[in-house]
């Protein structure tokens, strides 16, 4: 059994990667296979924590800090992994289809950079807890700028997540990774997918606006949502 797990997925090719390629793979799997999906799940389902006295207690920023740390850490690991693979060139185990993995990697790099740049669209916060002391802000008032930011940020994020899973799988294939790696990642991603479904069915999705300021319709963002729902 151990020998079977240690054997490469394609027995017609060697699993022959140098140290730099190996670290490229480890860093990219940690970044895009672990940190990014965890950051997405935490941001989606843990804006309000299970034991939080919501809506009496609002603006618990655990999700924000964790999401930011996960995504920022992933970008740093991705940058280091990119330098490693550019430094060492193609691996011995690579096939003629390596270009697919390369283009997926560059696409994810572009999406990651775009995600960082999209933060410039975030605008001001506003609301009762704004340190500036002003209620007015792009987020609190849900201005067009904020609406564009949310649409762009979420779209880019989910696109990067989907492509990153494909990039990790094609990377494993190019490295002719042993079976235990494929199985470990399959179990990990399967567990994350199951958690996603469970959390979704439990109704753990809370809008960012509501998590920050509560569901009171006197807040302009909530009033806008009520008006939109009423108008169909």
Image (cartoon, helix red, strand yellow):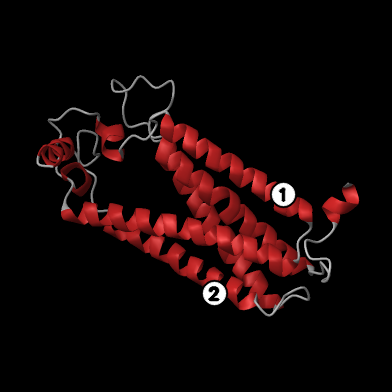
* Image mark count: 2
Position of residue 159 relative to residue 63, above or below, is below
State left or right for residue 218 relative to residue 153.
Answer: left
Q: Position of residue 43 (x, y in %)?
A: 42, 42
Residue 176: horizontal and vertical position, in percent?
76, 66
Q: For residue 149, which quarter of the picture?
A: bottom left
Crowd class of label 1 (few under 14; some 14 to 19; many from 20; radius 10 Å): few
From this viewpoint, is residue 134 visible? no
53 shown above or below 79: above
Question: Which x, y percent locates residue 85?
Answer: 66, 72
Residues at circles 2 and 1 in contact by the CB criterion of under 8 Å? no
Q: How many angstroms separate mark 2 from mark 1 (CA)?
A: 25 Å
Viewed as shown, does residue 34 lie left or right of 180?
left
Mark 1, secondary structure of its residue = helix
Q: Say which of 28 and 101 sits in front.
A: 101
Q: Which mark is residue 103?
A: 2
The structure residue drawn at horizontal position 36% and vertical position 57%, both measured from the top left corner, is 155
- Against 9, residue 192 (above or below) is above
Which numbered disc, 2 or 1, marks the residue that appears first in the sequence? 2
Residue drawn at the location 83% of the way across and 66% of the way down: 11
Q: Nearer the viewer, mark 2 or mark 1?
A: 1
Numbered badge on residue 122:
none
Q: Quadrant of the C terminus?
A: top left
Please tell me whether residue 67 is drawn above or below residue 110 in the rendered image.
above
Q: Label 1 belongs to which residue?
A: 183
How far across and down, in percent of the image, does residue 174 sit?
70, 69
């Amino acid at each position: 059994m151990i020998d079977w797990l240690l054997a490469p997925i394609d027995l017609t090719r060697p699993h022959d990667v140098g140290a730099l390629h190996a670290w490229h793979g480890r860093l990219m799997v940690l970044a895009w296979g672990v940190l990014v999906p965890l950051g997405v799940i935490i941001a989606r389902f843990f804006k309000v924590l299970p034991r939080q006295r919501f809506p009496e207690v609002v603006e618990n920023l655990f999700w924000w800090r964790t999401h930011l740390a996960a995504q920022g850490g992933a970008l740093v690991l991705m940058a280091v992994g990119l330098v490693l693979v550019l430094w060492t060139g193609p691996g011995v185990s690579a096939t003629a289809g390596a270009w697919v993995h390369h283009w997926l990697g560059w696409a994810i790099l572009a999406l990651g950079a775009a995600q960082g740049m999209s933060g410039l669209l975030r605008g001001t916060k506003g609301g009762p807890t704004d340190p500036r002391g002003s209620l007015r802000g792009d987020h609190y008032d849900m201005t067009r700028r904020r609406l564009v930011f949310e649409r762009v940020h979420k779209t880019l994020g989910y696109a990067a997540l989907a492509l990153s899973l494909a990039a990790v799988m094609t990377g494993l294939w190019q490295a002719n990774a042993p079976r235990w790696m494929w199985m470990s990642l399959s179990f990990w991603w399967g567990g994350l997918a199951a958690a996603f479904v469970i959390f979704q069915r439990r109704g753990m999705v809370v809008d960012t606006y509501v998590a920050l300021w509560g569901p009171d319709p006197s807040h302009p963002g909530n009033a806008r949502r009520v008006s939109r729902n009423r108008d169909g």
